[in-house]
Amino acid sequence: EENLADVSGKLAGLIKGGFGTNTRAGAARFLSSIVLRMRYDIKPVCSKLLKALTYSLGDESNRAVCKAYASTFAQLSKFSEERKVDSRVEKLLEVIHGEGSTMHSIFILELARQAPDVFARHKPRILPLAFYMKHNSSKKVKAVWEAVWDEEGPAASTAVRIFHEEIGTLCLEALQSDKWDTRRAGALGIKELVEKSDGIVLNNRELLCNNLLDALKGRYWDGKEVILEALGKLLIFQQLEGDLQLKALRAFFECLKKKKTVLVKAADKAILEAVPFVKEGPEGEVGKLLDEITSFAGSDRGKEEDESSGEETNGKKDGWDVEKFLPALSKVTKEWRAKHS
């Protein structure tokens, strides 16, 4: 205890600026052993050590070092002042929300594993973030947040009931990103949120729908088809009515006319899955739109001609099999009309 200030100062220096994996990871492990021995007696120097452990995360690429830092951070957080720990955790979450690396995420995972009481104080913010980050395009980041969710996440229905607005906000922010992989992650998050909402009315369902429709505008980006999948799930599990369901169906129809095969196939699937759950409007708008879709699919525009020979490609439009879609659409439309007659 007499040498605590000196020892902690030297350890903080090695952790922040030590050279080599063995030096930095070893310093963190040594600090962890001190924490476990001294427990609350280490509180006077905790703030300095917490800052040291998170000092250079943005530049840290060594996973072994980061793992050692994260583990020691979790141990230290149990015996530090709450406000000091909470300040560091909030900064970590801010960085993660702003496209943080795997290294930042590992700190949250170690809190879940080694300091559940500390983790619990931040659950309302961490769990919605974990739900969204599970759809990250990076396999390493995704794996970390799936592990966080497995450690502390509630049952899917509970998560949707408690956190659907917070999850929705994170996903909608992602849809506004300039990066296509971030937009795709947002759409995947909405899709899973809606899929797990069976029996639960989402307060933000109209907001989700309108933003998904807006995200369909403009040029194709890799993963845009997930928007159609998420819209389809909204129609199935949230049973949108009026203008919203009509807008969603028309969006599917417009994508059937596109040249991008993945969009056409996604629209095909969304229409066939969603139609049974759609309600007719007072003016018979849905029935009229289904007639338009059927007419288009059966017309020459619904098929693609081989530019070199001028022959139709067996009813397939750039990989989309119209001949399979038409009877399937006819079947679901017939059943839908019988239900709403």
Image (tube, rainbow, N blue to C red):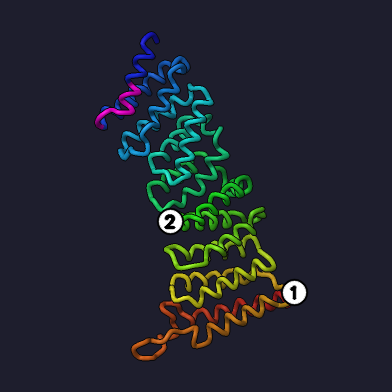
Question: What is the span of residues highlighted in magenta in the rendered image?
Answer: 11-20
User: Is residue 200 in view from this perspective?
Assistant: no
- Binning the other alpha carbons within 10 Å of mark 1 as few (below 14), some (14 to 19) or many (20 upward) gives few
Mark 2 surroundings within 10 Å by alpha-carbon count, few (fewer than 14), some (14 through 19), many (20 or more): few
Mark 1–mark 2 distance (CA, rounded to whole Å): 41 Å
Residue 179's disc is 2
Q: Quadrant of residue 121?
A: top right
Is residue 13 located in the magenta-colored stretch of the structure? yes
Secondary element type, mark 2: loop
Q: Of the residues tagged 1 and 2, which is closer to the observer?
A: 2
Please state the horizontal and vertical placement of residue 113, each as a whole percent of the image: 46, 34
Residue 309 in view:
yes
Question: Is label 1 in a helix, a strand or a loop?
Answer: loop
Along the line of sight, the residue nearer the viewer: 45 or 205: 45
Instruction: Give the mark nearest the N terminus, 1 or 2.
Output: 2
User: In the image, residue 185 lies at what x, y percent?
Assistant: 47, 55
Residue 166 painted magenta: no
Quadrant, the C terminus: bottom right
Residue 282 is labelled as 1
Instruction: Name the residue: 45% across, 14% down.
Output: 41
